[in-house]
Amino acid sequence: MRKCVRILDVNVDDLTMDGAIDSIVKLLKDDKNNIICTPNAEIMMTSYKDDELRFILNESSMVIPDGCGVVLASKILGVPLKERVAGYDLVQGIFKLKLDRKIRMFLLGGAPLVAKRAAERYANLEGVEFVGYYDGYFTEEEEPGIIDRINELDVDILLVGMGAPKQEKWMYKNKDKLKVKISMGVGGSFDIMAGEVKRAPKFFRDNGLEWFYRLCKQPTRLKRMLKLPRFILLVIYKRLVNG
């Protein structure tokens, strides 16, 4: 049974990384398409004003606290989450699984050739097989063909890297059309997997400063990053109002 912490009207799973991996193994035995979302503070702030996104997050099978800001918010509210479970790290954890058969995975999203390069770099995994990939620049007319292709390949896990909230809305819209066990939003993970973008050093990740590293590397992200302090201030306000 899920244990969740409610943050700005969104139910966030209170899991460790090991707990999230265990839950994924269970979902792989399910007969339906389970959506996994990985919101950081920016996405949580967006969902506060986006009713559709907030609804999708609450309808998902798992919502993991991807950002340190989400964990900080839970502490401010007096219901601390166990730990941050970064979406990229969760994917890496899935790659290490060794089940009774290989996990069939499809990569959907990213710029042209990025998903292909990501799949090629991880082609030798013992427990995962990449059975297909497609970039995120497809038209609405191409969409049915892509879904048919995914279904024909008997995919277990579909990783969707289109950025939020596009990926969440796409996964939910096509939830009943996709014959997969898990659809998981992974944001820009393909860029890191493909070697196109360097991830923040461990020091920055461990100390909640990954956002600062990314801002230094990409100053154009400043407008987006401003959602982080706004998110924390809103959480503080909610705590003061609600006691």
Image (cartoon, rainbow, N blue to C red):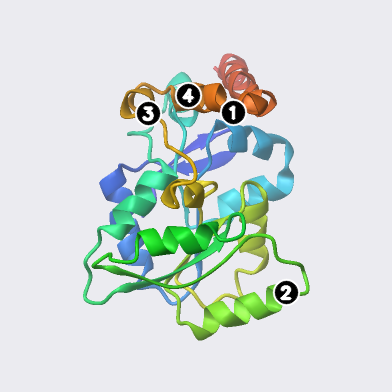
Say whether marks 3 and 4 touch (CB < 8 Å).
Answer: no
Q: Residue at the location (67% across, 56% down)?
A: 169
Residue at 40%, 73% in the rendered image: 30
Q: Furthest residue to the top?
A: 240
The amino acid beneath tag 4 is Tyr
Q: Which residue is mark 1?
A: 218
Quarter of the image that includes the C terminus: top right
Q: CA distance from mark 2 to mark 4?
A: 37 Å
Mark-to-mark CA distance, 3 and 2: 38 Å
Q: Residues within 10 Å of mark 4 (few under 14, many from 20)?
A: some
List the residue tagged with mark 2. Answer: 142
CB atoms of marks 1 and 2 within 8 Å:
no
Foreground residue among 117 and 48: 117
Residue in the picture at 63% in, 46% down: 164
Kindly check if marks 3 and 2 are in contact, taking CB atoms under 8 A apart as contact.
no
Are dots 3 and 1 in contact, CB under 8 Å? no
Badge 3 amino acid:
Arg
Q: Secondary structure at mark 3?
A: helix
Residue bearing the label numbered 3: 205
Left or right of 58 in this view: 65 = left
* Amino acid at pointer 2: Glu
Residue 136: name its quadrant. bottom right
Count neighbours of disc 2 (C-alpha within 10 A) and say few if under 14, some if 14 to 19, many if 20 or more. Answer: few
- Give the residue at mark 4: 213
What amino acid does circle 1 point to?
Answer: Gln
Query: Is the N terminus in the top left, top right, bottom left or bottom right quadrant?
Result: bottom left
